[in-house]
Amino acid sequence: MDPKSDILLQTTGCTWLSPISTFLGVPLDQVNFIMCQMFGLAAASWFRLYLSPQRVGPAVRHAVASFLGSMFIIFSFGWYSLHVFMMSFICYVILHRASVHTVHWYSMIVAMGYLTACQVSRVIIFNYGVLATDFSGPLMMMVQKITTLAFQLHDGKCHKQEELTEEQRRLAVVTPPSLLEYLSYTLNFMSILVGPCSNYRDYTEFIEGHHVHSKLKHNIQQNGYHTHADPSPVRAVCQKLMVCLGCLFWFFTITRRFPISLNVEPGFVNEASFLSRLAYAFISIQASRPKFYFAWTIADAVHNAAGYGISGLDQKGRVSWDLISNIHIWKIETATSFKMFIDNWNIQTGVWLKSVCYDRVPYFRTPLTFMLSALWHGVYPGYYFTFLTGIPITLTARAARRNFRHYFLHSRSVKLVYDVITWAVTQLTICYAVLPFLVLAVEPTVIYYRSMYFYVHIISILGMLIPASRPRRPDLYAQHFNNNVKGE
């Protein structure tokens, strides 16, 4: 195949960087993403220093943020970027024309419907596993922003203060945004490619210059914290860039040596022992995580470089820049429960699921939230295998924790043994559950689960039959999302 044709199959975005892609052996869409984020990092610093609220008005900041974001999306996806703009404008019309009593549901149906239609087209046009030309990523973030804003507008216009939770009251939107404000929120260069989604009021406070005072006013009142200038994000940005460099090093030295596809290759499945297959699944999936760590961490760094992301003060009295962080890597790698893992993975998506689904539906909250998460991710069967498998795992993990954990807390040494065992069980369970998410299709998923003798499915379904010996506690999603909202 001609190299130029191969490049066009990889992406419909800009091909200027194809020599770098060829040299590194990295798909062009990934090279474009990294270059956009690096340029975004420089643009964010310029935005903070030269377009600060003290220098220019909110309109200029809104306009520049949305213009740069539009350029990023066009550079990365070419004509496919039209889908992002179309969804944005259609949902803006709904936001202003629909009744405030139904605007949140119309926005959800239209945004999710448009996203699903695009994802179906990708399944039909492209083969399984071809994730280049994946314009659905920005659309997924657009859905989060549009529906978050619509639900918060509904809260602000249709509910009394006492009917809302404390967090809903803080985030409620009373006045629909102007077109410029809306485009800045949905298309801004900091989050257009990979997110994360932030709340509309937090974003507008950042643009208008109230972000620092809003997040530190409690500390100002209680602890006497004060500053004559906005806190510098340099330390936080540098720390996150070091993490990104570590992830890149891991990718080029480790990830490529342990391809996920080997888990479902017939030769490996038929010849390797069960323990060998189990060990390789663990190693290969551990090796695949840094690409997600890199994408979310560099996006967080871009926000911080622009001066956005303060959540308050940490335990040492320093400004904490994790308001919209999407991962806590150490907590993920040392998770000793299924809950602890999902608490710290794709955090802002968890917050979104809580605010638009879990808190809104009266029945079957956990299954419906899992299903919305699966639909939002796409229509590849692997997503549904993963999230449907997660339901019995969640219920079993909760029952086991209630019934047995308290027996291991009486001494430090016993607790250590318990933690080591639960860490191993959690990591192996996560590997089993997420592998379909990575291989996408039905056939390799079935091959893998057969090679594992469906052991997690069997154990988790049997575990659901264990009666709870302790009082029922709030659902996993309630604890998970409440912890994230509190910044725990």
Image: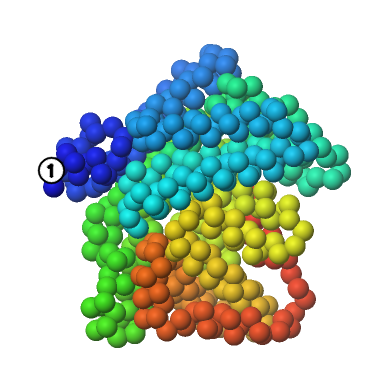
- How would you rate the neighbour count of disc 1 (Cα within 10 Å): few for under 14, some for 14-19, many for 20 or more? few
Task: Return the residue nearer the eye: 151 or 46.
Answer: 151
Q: Is residue 265 above or below residue 163?
A: below
Q: Position of residue 261 (x, y in %)?
A: 29, 66
Q: Position of residue 16 (x, y in %)?
A: 23, 31
Q: Position of residue 108 (x, y in %)?
A: 63, 44
Task: Return the residue nearer the eye: 120 or 213.
Answer: 120
| Residue occupying the point 42% across, 33% down | 81
Callout 1 amino acid:
Asp
Q: Is residue 229 above or below residue 347?
A: above
Q: Position of residue 111 (x, y in %)?
A: 58, 41
Q: Quadrant of the C terminus?
A: bottom right
Quadrant of the rendered image containing residue 339: bottom right
Element class at badge 1: loop
The furthest residue to the front: 124
Q: Is residue 181 above or below residue 173?
A: above
| Residue occupying the point 51% across, 31% down | 86
Residue at image mark 1:
2
Direction from residue 323 to residue 269 in the image, left or right: left
Quadrant of the rendered image containing residue 252: bottom left
